[in-house]
């Protein structure tokens, strides 16, 4: 399974690791993804999603159904 948030599409970012002598090497900054079982009230069922922690905070604030609708995601297909 790829490391991509199922709601927001957040994925790894290319970056540079810089040493003390300022030698740069490429590195990947992975998204902070968590596997969570979330209750979807409108669908009256549990959904097992791989979401970023930023998305989890927004889900806690707005609710899963409202947040998915604002992103244009149909939770019935997940």
Image: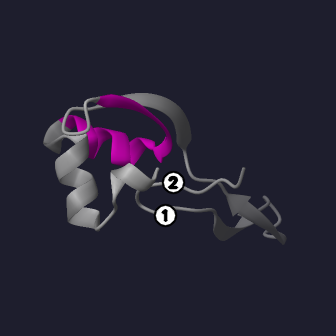
Task: Kindly identify the residue that appears in the image at 23 percent across and 53 percent down.
Answer: 67
Q: Is residue 47 magenta?
A: yes
Element class at badge 2: loop
Which residue is located at x 33 percent, y 59 percent? Answer: 74
* Identity of the residue drawn at 63% across and 62% down: 12
Q: Magenta residues, as a range? A: 45-60
Residue under numbered circle 2:
5
What coloring was used for the rendering? one colour
Is 52 left or right of 73, judged from the image as shown? right
**In the image, which disc is placed on residue 37?**
none
Mark number displayed over residue 9: 1
Q: CA distance from mark 2 to mark 1?
A: 5 Å
Q: Tell which of 7 and 17 is nearer to you.
A: 7
Query: Is the residue under label 1 in contact with that under label 2 (CB below 8 Å)?
Result: yes
Residue at 22% across, 59% down: 69
Relative height, residue 52 to residue 19 (above, below): above
- Residue 40 coordinates in the image, percent (x, y): 28, 35
Q: How crowded is the residue under tag 1: few (<14 C-alpha within 10 Å), some, or many (20+)?
A: few
């Amino acid at each position: 399974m790829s490391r991509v948030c199922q709601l927001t599409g957040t994925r790894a970012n290319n970056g540079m690791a810089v040493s003390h002598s300022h030698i740069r090497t490429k590195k990947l900054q992975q998204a902070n993804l968590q596997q969570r079982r979330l209750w979807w009230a409108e669908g009256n069922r549990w959904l097992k999603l791989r979401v970023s922690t930023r998305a989890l905070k927004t889900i806690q604030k707005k609710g899963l159904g409202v947040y998915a609708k604002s992103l244009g995601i149909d939770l019935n297909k997940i």
